[in-house]
Image (cartoon, grey):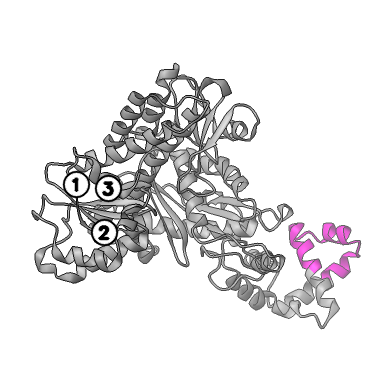
Amino acid sequence: MHVDHLRQLDSLGITLVWGDEHLLGREISGVTATDLEDPERFLRPGEIVLTGLVWWHPDDGRAKAERFVAALSAGGAVALLAGEETHGAVPADLVDACRAHRVPLLSVPARTSFRAVTEAVYLRQWGDLSRLPAPHHALPENVRGELGRLLERGAGPAELLESAFAHLGTPPCHLLTSTGRTVARTSSAPALSAREAVRLLRSASGTTLRVQADATAYDAWQLHLPDTDAAPPRVLHETAEVLAQHRHHHDRRRAARARAHEALVDLLVRADAGAPDTDALAAALRACGLPARGSYRVVVAGVGAFGAGAGAGAGAGGGGAVDGVGASRAAAGVAPPGPGLALDALAEATRHLTSAPFAVAERPGVGAVAIIPVDAGADGTGGAGRESGDGLRDGFRDVWPLLRACRPDAALHAGISTLIPDPAGLGRAVVQARYALAGARTTAPAAAGPEASAVTAVDDLSTLESLLAGVPHDVRAAYLSSTLGPLLGESRASHGVLLETLEVFLGHNGSWARTAKALQLHVNTVHYRIRRVEALTGRDLSRLDHKLDLRAALLCR
């Protein structure tokens, strides 16, 4: 459908305000209705934009109209349709801005609803598709009309899927993400676990069609029909197009909430371990649609390894790879994971585990942060779509390998806070989750290579080794130097022997006899070496606290 076709629909009464023949001949890919002053980030190239001009006032002058139209041009809009109801006519400032940026401008009379325009565009698009020569059937006209009405009403993917296949007897059909999350299924389709769904998508059975919409490596939608003969291919393609339109509108609404999520995360990060301002926190939670009371967990995710070459603060950050991993990828000509990957992964993982609202945002130097309300009970049912506290923690561990399989080149890690009984503790929970993330990066299995991924919960920090894993590398290095410094120099080989003896001695709980046996030494030699360690470090290994000091230092290597 071209822009000029809108003028030819007498039922709409749309008139041309400005636009030349070339511009009016451009193809329409979709419709966006907005009254935002800067809608660029919500647009897709080829769309027409409907606006009621609520954002404009006669006293605003030319600047506001200029900014609005410039955003449309940058976003690839093919035309602006301005409603007459708010101001009675299209403002001259808007006409001048459209002429300057070469964006066709059409006027929509007050009697014509934006819904009627949207429906006309989509019905024309599907009608054009059904008239293309092809040996297969397409969706019947009444089905396309019903799907258009459902889209306009904001129906969910399950209702759209059911309606699209009803005329075929509603065969089993699933709408799945790349990680196996079930977005929707027809009433005849069985429930699938995420792992079962992933196996199904990777198998050669049935028919799988990707829904062409903006998506990440983790949440791309796949339409899967187990019985290849249950629906003609063109019905699948048209259904996928309907779902793509729904996805587009859904993602625009999600993007509109992103600022509220970022504001909440910023508030909690600024609060650090303290309690954020009560009123500000309540307002931020309300803006995100989250409850002002009840239990929460916080999850922080990041991409990249964390180890011997990490700089200060890398343990809690959300940046790219460190300790040479990024450099090795660059040398091999492999592009490192891009920005937003941790955010995409964390959002998809959380949607696997809860249908309740949550907030997720990525902040520089912190990582991707998810604020998730949970049911504090242990039954795992999670009232109102929530997962239980323990279920959420265990669920992240279950779904993480599915995320990693979508991007095996990315070392994806996550840290999970304890269960916070009240939102006032969310600032502390962010600190906990960042610490656990640093521990996950440090303890990721080395045998799995630099792209190994790990999930660590603060609840897992039950040993001295796991506790120290979350300490930033530079802090561990400083402690190691101040505690074992005299034994770390490479100038004297005997110091390496002393370090080995100390490690075996502490590993055998200070037993002289067992240490001597393990090292195949005389017990007097062990006594001599330990006395040398004590002299060089200033520690007394007959004292428990000094033993712990040295043990912690060895773990920091």
Q: Is residue 104 left or right of residue 141?
A: left
| Residue farthest to the bottom, as pictured | 491
Query: Which residue, given by chain and number where applicable, does mark 1 sit on?
Result: 14
Image quarter of residue 162 = top left
Q: Is residue 195 above or below residue 63?
A: above
Q: Is residue 65 left or right of residue 238?
A: left
Query: Which residue, given by chain and number where applicable, does mark 2 sit on?
Result: 19
Residue pictured at 57% horizontal, 46% vertical: 403
Looking at the picture, how far across and down is residue 33, in whole percent? 26, 49
Closer to the N terminus: mark 3 or mark 1? 1
Looking at the picture, how far across and down is residue 392, in whole percent? 47, 41
Most prominent secondary structure in the magenta stretch?
A: helix
Circles 2 and 1, Cβ within 8 Å, touching? The answer is no
| Residue farthest to the front, as pictured | 21
Q: Is residue 276 above or below residue 208?
A: below
Circles 2 and 3, Cβ within 8 Å, touching? The answer is no
Q: Residues within 10 Å of mark 1 (few under 14, many from 20)?
A: many
Q: Hey, what amino acid is under mark 3?
A: Ala
| Residue farthest to the top, as pictured | 169
Eye-nearest disc, 3 or 1:
1
Residue pictured at 70% horizontal, 67% vertical: 328
The magenta segment: 500-527
Task: Kindly tell me whether residue 177 is visible in this rendering.
Answer: yes
Q: Hey, what amino acid is under mark 2?
A: Gly
What is the CA distance from the residue labelled 2 to the residue labelled 1?
Answer: 13 Å
Q: Residues within 10 Å of mark 3 (few under 14, many from 20)?
A: some
> Toward the viewer: 385 or 281?
385
Query: Which residue, given by chain and number where applicable, does mark 3 sit on?
Result: 292
The magenta stretch spans residue 510: yes
